[in-house]
Image (cartoon, grey):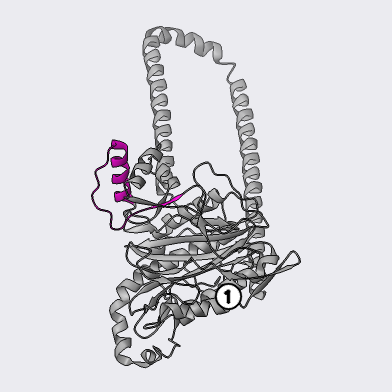
Amino acid sequence: MESKDKEIKKEEVEQKKEQEEVKEQIEAGEENQEKKKKKKKKNKNKNKGEKGEGNEGEEEEQKDGEEEGEEGGEDNQDGEKKKKKKKKNKKKKAATEGEQGEQKQEENQKYLGPCYKPGMKISKSRYQDNSYLRNLGDWKDGEWNQTNPPTITVDDQYPGGVFPKGVLIDYTRKECQWRTTDAELKEKDKISEHHLNLLRKGAECHRQVRKRCQKIIRPGKKLIDICEEIEELNRYLVQENGLEAGIAFPTGCSLNHVAAHYTPNPGDNTTIEYDDVCKIDFGTQVQGRIIDCAFTVSFNPKYDKLLEGVKDATMTGIKSAGIDVRLCDVGADIQEVMESYEVELDGKVYPIKPVRNLNGHSIDPYKIHAGKSVPIVGGGSQEKMEEGETFAIETFGSINGKGFVIEDGDCSHYMKDFDAGKVPLRSQRARSLLNYINKNHSTLAFCRRWLDRGGQVGHIIGLKELVNAGIVNPYPPLVDVKGSYVAQYEHTIYLNSSHKEIISAGDDY
């Protein structure tokens, strides 16, 4: 609180100082204008006086000059024309130089990202109070290379190209506890540094985007505006460059009973309200290395226990994960913790149910679901986690629902099938759309808004043909029963030889 108060006081002092400086500038400007007026008036009076004294000799001068005037009349006219032309050219040159100067100034003014508006105050403070969002930690003061609002790309913040590590955790399960102290395996960890550094870059971008996102989310705001602000900042900070770097999948903002795979289609003006439970799920990718990370937003304290229980279950899954650990054992640990929570809602008590047909998953380059599923209930796959694997550990908890989701609603998420072969397409429209998808998204997920943004207007018929041909897979919204509320938390982790790393961890969660 002291830090927050100091920051607020500091900003107030700075603003007051700025206002005083502006006031001084205005007053100084007014004084200068007054001085100029007085000087002008004085010169005018002086000229009038000189003109009056010269009236006596005016007639004689006029007579003497009549003859000369007749002879030099033509020369004087030519001289006047030349003077006027010279004056006109001078004005034209000054105007051209002025325009060039303005243009040069505009060119030199560096673009400061989608969050910055002209005249906006830029702060270096990292602190951000998230208390109104429920169950998200505040962003603490400390060393930070970014500004507020964000104006510096991640590469420019770390010119050496080495990005911050996530949270390192020793293995705790008996199956892999010995790995923590094995010197040979610690040496082996260095081999994976390049791969990890790409993930860390994506994670740093994710942290900074979600920090900004948490600042702008308010009741009454359109979900489409929230998604587009997240995506524009994501593109800017990671320096979007085709398939080399950019957004990993569409921004999810699923409300209440909708658990996943919802993002607004063009024209959808749904807003987030005070009583809503909203899952914000977005990702970054650098050279195909994907960060998949999500959190839940609510404003009403009555959902606090739901959010707390699901977040606790996710962190339990992360603690449980490790090399040679069976996936079913991770699921059993998650289920035990989640089901230990109850939520009182409008006078009734509801147990939190794990959404049993939703899972975490392994991640490969350019492939968000790489084959292994991490269940959130016991009794699943006996398959083991392995060294060098990347996982998204995510859990979904539901109250007043079935704890089971089905596909329902307008589809917004699509993804090219990773193993899609060459299929003949009947229409030029479908062929053109497929070329666009291959070039801009490849096997990464995309949404209809992005197709519109890329100039693929009227894409619906072509997209339908690609879906029917099995080249593109649709991912409709996944929903529990209406009247239920689903929360989600997710982090990306990496299983190193001697420890695991929560790559996407931040002050917020």
Q: Foreground residue, 86 or 383?
A: 383
Q: Position of residue 313 (x, y in %)?
A: 55, 75
- In the image, what residue type sits under mark 1? Met
Left or right placement of residue 307 versus residue 330 in this view: right
Does the segment drawn in magenta span residue 355? no
- How many marks the image carries: the answer is 1
Determine which quarter of the picture holds residue 101.
top left
Left or right placement of residue 233 versus residue 430 in this view: right
Query: Residue placed at 39% from the left, 67% from the top?
Result: 201
> Where is 463 relative to 139, above or below?
above
Left or right placement of residue 118 versus residue 7 in this view: left
> Where is 37 relative to 11, above or below?
above
Q: Foreground residue, 87 or 317?
A: 317
Q: Foreground residue, 83 or 333?
A: 333
For the residue carrying disc 1, how many other residues have a C-alpha within 10 Å: few (<14), some (14-19), or many (20+)? many
> Where is 403 relative to 262, above or below?
below
Does the segment drawn in magenta span residue 433? yes
Query: Is residue 115 visible in the rendered structure shown here?
Result: no
Q: Position of residue 104 (x, y in %)?
A: 39, 44
Determine which quarter of the picture holds residue 89.
top left
Q: Position of residue 332 (x, y in %)?
A: 50, 79
Q: Kindly state the secondary structure of the residue where label 1 is placed.
A: helix
> Where is 153 relative to 22, above or below?
below
User: Magenta segment range?
Assistant: 412-440
Image quarter where the N terminus lies is: bottom right
Image quarter where the C terminus lies is: bottom right
Identify the residue position indicated by label 1 in the image: 338
Q: Position of residue 404 (x, y in %)?
A: 54, 63
Query: Is residue 361 visible in the rendered structure shown here?
Result: yes
Determine which quarter of the picture holds residue 371.
bottom left
Left or right placement of residue 418 versus residue 247 in this view: left
